Image (tube, coloured by chain):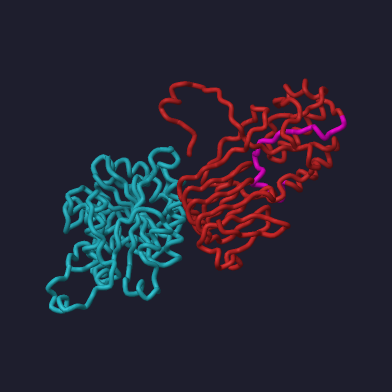
Chain colours: A cyan, B red
Amino acid sequence: MATVIVITSGKGGVGKTTTSAAISTGLALCGYKTVVIDFDVGLRNLDLIMGCERRVVYDFVNVIKQESNLRQSLIKDKRVDNLFILPASQTRDKDILDIEGVGRVIDELSESFDYIICDSPAGIERGAFMAMYFADEAVVVTNPEVSSVRDSDRILGLLASKTRRAEQGGKPIKEHLLLTRYDPLRVDKGEMLSVEDVKDILAIPLLGVIPESKAVLQASNAGTPIILEGDSDAGQAYDDAVSRLLGEERMHRFLEVEKKGFFSKFRLFRS
Amino acid sequence: MKPLTDQETEEAAVAIKARMVSMTVLELLSTDLEALDRQLQEATAQASSFFRNAPVLLDFQYLDAEPDPRWLERASHMVRAHHFVPVGMASAPESLVKGARETCLAVWPGSHNGRQESAPEPEPEPVPPARPKSEPEPEPEPEVNQEKLPAQTMTIHQPVRSGQKVYARGGDLLVLASVSTGAEIMADGHIHVYGTLRGRALAGALGDENARIFCQDLQADLVSIAGLYTINEDLPQDKCKTAVQIFLDQDQLHIESL
């Protein structure tokens, strides 16, 4: 049985797709057979971030409509073993997703995969609802600013009431907070909410803090999941987050403004 | 917070239990069916979703006339047409008790809910709040116990998130976590919040002026008691982010440190 993880946020542009690409790649690198599904039907992006946009033949909607089978539709990643992508359809809209269809695809993937990562669209409409419905765990991606935090709070409410686990009264979904685009300098100046502020409001365990980094946009444009950029702090932070997702304990890094001290000038003791 | 559907209850096909629930009561004050129809229409127009499919008890204690079973049949048909679900009669005159079986209404003996002290009000629910959506409340069932027991308290252990509504109908509300901004908690009685109160809190939702709000950390969007409210901007600065109680005294909201 696979573990189904939804990457969600409510608000758009906070880094859901970047996170989906990074986490699924990270899990695959750890040896788990992983598939990442793009639920953003009509506005697909995951294929770009994963660098497989030219290899899409059949998509998620084709599988739901039984116009193609999974073997035809899954795209195997060229860099990482065990990693597969199920792209969204660009020419349909989200109303085409239905619980039975999505459930059937998830069930079928469950048989052969360890992890199913669902990349949720923004909003709280049908696409987002379908992405979260079958989840066992949820990674709530939040930027350190009030509107993103409030939307995440709303999503957490929906995760606790509108999902299969909530409806069947089973174990609640395991929730993780992932704070992205974190800039310690601006936090110090009081321009951004701090980790503690966000944790206080959302009251769920912190999976990781991803620092604001130019490398993220560069990696996206190049179609490389940021976690593969091991030199970048964002890539390392995602690597930590994946380890924590797998149960390992790791210190949170990149929370403080980097001191420009004697040693760092000579790049001797950089973490 | 869901009703039990675990293995252990699944094996037994039925369990008979007593449970206290609050219920909407329709106090019948006249046998004039047209007036009844009109006034029900007005009452439900204000809050159709609140009353929709609400179980109601027909209370005859203020009705002097002795209507016949045919009247009861027409009256309950009319009540159903307004999307109430009549489940029983209280203080029903002798003439109706027999007809009750045919209209599928349970018969409650006497008046037992201590409503006599207040003047009868034809319009129920002065502050019609919307039904809570995210937190299921216990299934409404007819009251079994005739003794006056303390009202039920609803206890919430998880954070109440933005967009969620919780309504403790007929009793107090106890929240052991925080209430986010954009969330709404309501109770007919008192409200206690042991986390941070950032959302809206409305105590005494049916007009109980003795209801109070207690919270550990006041950062509320809005607080209201029996319909009298104040918004965040008007909260006294020295009381914000502290533990307070909020109560009504002479039609004024008072916020006092705990």
Q: Quadrant of the C terminus of chain A?
A: bottom left
Q: Which residues are magenta?
A: B44-65
Q: Is residue B205 above or below residue A79?
A: above
Between A260 and B85, the residue placed more toward the observer is: A260
Is residue A75 shown to the viewer in this render? no
**For residue B18, what is the image quadrant?**
top right
In the image, what residue occupies the spot 19% across and 66% down? A229
Q: Is residue B110 visible?
A: yes
Image side of residue B65 versus residue A244, left or right: right
Identify the residue at image location x=64%, y=37%: B22
The spot of residue B126 in percent (x, y) is 72, 49
Q: Quadrant of residue A142?
A: bottom left
Question: As drawn, is B32 to the left or to the right of B203?
Answer: right
Judged from this view, the residue extending furthest toward the right is B65
Q: How many marks?
A: 0
Q: Residue A39 at what x, y percent from top left?
A: 36, 54
Residue shown at 41% from the left, 60% from the top: A122
Q: Quadrant of the N terminus of chain A?
A: top left
- Establish if A191 lies above or below B229: below
Q: Position of residue B229 (x, y in %)?
A: 65, 59
Q: Residue at x 78, y 27 (%)?
A: B92
Vertical placement of B113 versus B104: above or below? below
Query: Viewed as shown, does residue B211 lie left or right of B217?
Result: right
Q: Is residue B59 magenta?
A: yes
Q: List x then y, in percent, for residue B200.
A: 57, 57
